[in-house]
Structures are given as structure tokens and as C-alpha cells.
Amino acid sequence: MHEFGMPLLSGRNEILIDDTVSRREMFSVIYKMKRNNEFEYFTDIQPTPSVADIIWNAVMEIKYAGLDPDSLDETLFVSPEKARDIKNIIKNYDLLLKAEKMTDYPGLIQMLLESGVSSREVLLLVPNSLKLRFIERKFIDKAFSRLR
């Protein structure tokens, strides 16, 4: 995915961040939201790296599923307040990355899906046993569908 996405990122003057930087940015978002009393559900949490890590994992699962925060169904969460908090965390995280000219891995894949990357000059061999996330499989299916 990196080979396809790097030209897109450089054209936008953005960098691809690894999970360590992504987790640090998530902590920053949660810390700021807590300080500004922006939580409805997570009002009693203490913004620590371990709490941020747990929330980061949940956010990445949502992003890897290719879901947009606005499309998340609040009835699927423990409470509507928790759903709204998660949506706001994702939005604030994405805004922070954009402001810092950074992109995380699921953001890169989403960017590739939206750009319509072509597979004209590339042969991609993907073993059936390879564990791919939904958004990765979606990209491969779209970019390489004519090669099946």
C-alpha cells in the first residue's frame, strides 16, 4: 500500500505516521477533549497513555472497517453518549492529523480508494491465507479487480 500511496502523500505535503506517533496524537486528542469538558460518556476517565491506547484500538477498528464517523449508528453502542464521544474523538483525531499534515495507515488506504489508483503496471500476488482488514481487501479488490 505504501508504494501506491507515497506519491499521493507527497503531492499533499503529508507524511505517513506509524502507530507510535498515531497513539501519541490520540492521547493528545483525548487529553484536550477531557480538559475542555467535551465528553458525555467518558466524563470520569483520566487521560493516560493506557486509556488513550484502548480508545486508539477502538478507533482504528472503526477506521479499518472503512466506516465514516458520521455514519456510525448510535444504537449499536452501549449508549448514544458513548457513540457521540467516539465520533467526536475520531473527528478531532482526523482534524489534528490534517492540521499537522500527517496521515495514518487507514487514512492512506482511504485516500487510495478515493483516488482510483490503477493497477495497469503492477502485479500483486496475495495469498488467500493472508489476513487483511476490510479496508485493505476493499482497496485490493478495487485496484486489482481486472486481474483476478
Image (cartoon, grey):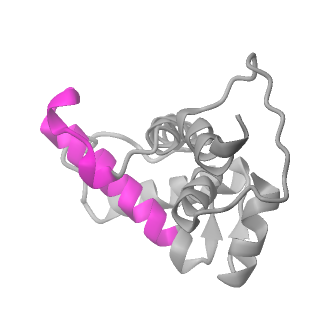
In the rendered structure, the answer to whether residue 51 lies left or right of residue 11 reads left
Q: Nearer the viewer, residue 76 or 124?
A: 124
Task: Judge whether 135 appears above or below 95 on screen.
Answer: above
**Above-or-below relation of 85 to 5:** above
Q: Residue at x 72, y 63 (%)?
A: 5
Magenta range is: 69-96
Residue 105 location in percent, x, y?
65, 52
Nearest the viewer among 104 and 100 is 104
118 left or right of 75 in image: right
x then y, percent, for residue 113: 55, 57
Residue situated in front as seen by the camera: 105 or 24: 105
Residue pictured at 55% horizontal, 41% vertical: 138
List x then y, in percent, for residue 38: 25, 59
Q: Is residue 131 above or below residue 39?
A: above
Check the picture and name the quadrant holding the C terminus: top right
Residue 108: quarter of image: bottom right
Does any portion of residue 34 appear in the rendered image? no
Q: What is the tally of numbered marks visible in this picture?
A: 0
What secondary structure is the magenta-colored segment mainly? helix
Based on the picture, tell me whether residue 83 belongs to the magenta stretch: yes
